[in-house]
Amino acid sequence: MNHSNIKRGLISSTAVSLLSLSSVFSQDLSLDDLEMRKKAILEEANPSVTVESILADRDEPLGKVVGAFKKQRYYTLSDTIYIQLKSSTVSPGDRFAIYTDEGGVTDPDRALRKLGKKIRVRGFIVVTKVTPDTVIGKIDESFIDIHIGDLIGPPFEVNIEVDPKEPDKMIRGRVLESAVNHEIIGGYEFAYLDKGSADGLALNDKLFVFRTADGSMKIDPHLPEVTIAEMVVVHVAEHFSTAYCLNSAEAFRKGSAFKSAKSEVKYLSEPTPAAAPAEPKVPTEGPPGPSDIAPPPE
């Protein structure tokens, strides 16, 4: 994926949105119309990203690519290929993902421990014909070159419209690795995280990458936390997830800490007003009434 193109696209869409907003407010519209137009323009500004690599809990391929109609080194959009599936329940029109298993991610704290499975999506195939011996299909979407031996899996959505939202709960975890094997991670890049749906993470949850105020990535609970990047979750597995970095003030690395982007502002409750003191009873002039005469001693 060309991340510079994504960056240019984001800047372009933001500029268009600002121009659109200025033109909206220059028109003679009612307040309701203004709000509706403003909402529509801002929704259009949400970037759409293509998630070509995810961190899954495990790899359970449904089959593999075994051949092709043409003899060539690699295959791409509209090429006809042959696949073998473990299940015979398949029909023309069925769609499958084509991918490679790139192994696990190295645990930042234990170099010999591998976590999850890196799944690199190469493209998608639509079944066109089913024979007793094989399944024939056409590649209808291709991100990188497809080869004989590549794996077949269930399809999933890779074109995600980013719509960040505040998570339901506070979750803290670690960045495991860059999705493209970069040593450092910054804006408009993807990263793998060590938390998933079992921990409460959900699609489009907004996250903060942070360090402590002394500049260290090793978190000291006695020091203030400084946010250095914002991410949004674009794919969720049970125990892992993949996130897209919206922006960053500083680059970060595997092992960096992240947390839910939840508001930590606390409001003091309004104090209960004290009851007004009772006014003293002022005696009235005139002859004493029954309540003013003390009872005779017994």
Image (cartoon, rainbow, N blue to C red):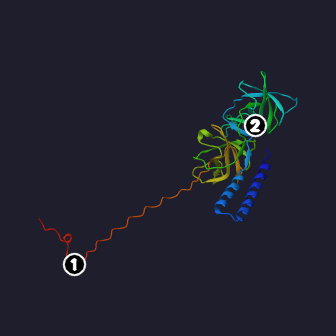
Q: How crowded is mark 2: few (under 14 residues within 10 Å), some or many (20 or more)?
A: many
Q: Pick the residue in front: 90 or 160.
A: 90
Is the N terminus in the top left, top right, bottom left or bottom right quadrant?
Answer: top right
Label 1 secondary element: loop
Mark 2 and mark 1: Cα distance apart in space = 101 Å
**Residue that badge 2 annotates:** 121
- Residue type, mark 2 in image: Val
- Choose the circle earlier in sequence order: 2 or 1: 2
Q: How busy is the neighbourhood of tag 1: few (under 14 within 10 Å), some, or many (20 plus)?
A: few
Q: Mark 1 points at which residue?
A: 286
Pick the residue in front: 174 or 120: 120
Q: Please identify the quadrant where the C terminus is shown.
A: bottom left
Residue 232, compared with residue 123, is above or below; it is below
Identify residue type, mark 1. Answer: Gly
Residue 218 shows in this picture:
no
Residue 113 vs residue 10: left or right? left
Nearest to the eye among marks 2 and 1: give it: 1
Q: As drawn, which residue projects farthest toward the top?
A: 132
Foreground residue, 109 or 15? 15
Looking at the image, the residue that sits furthest to the left is 298
Where in the figure is residue 41, as x and y percent of width and height? 71, 56
The residue sitting at 75% across, 37% down in the picture is: 121
Q: In this view, does 269 lie to the left or right of 171?
A: left
Which residue reaches farthest right? Answer: 71
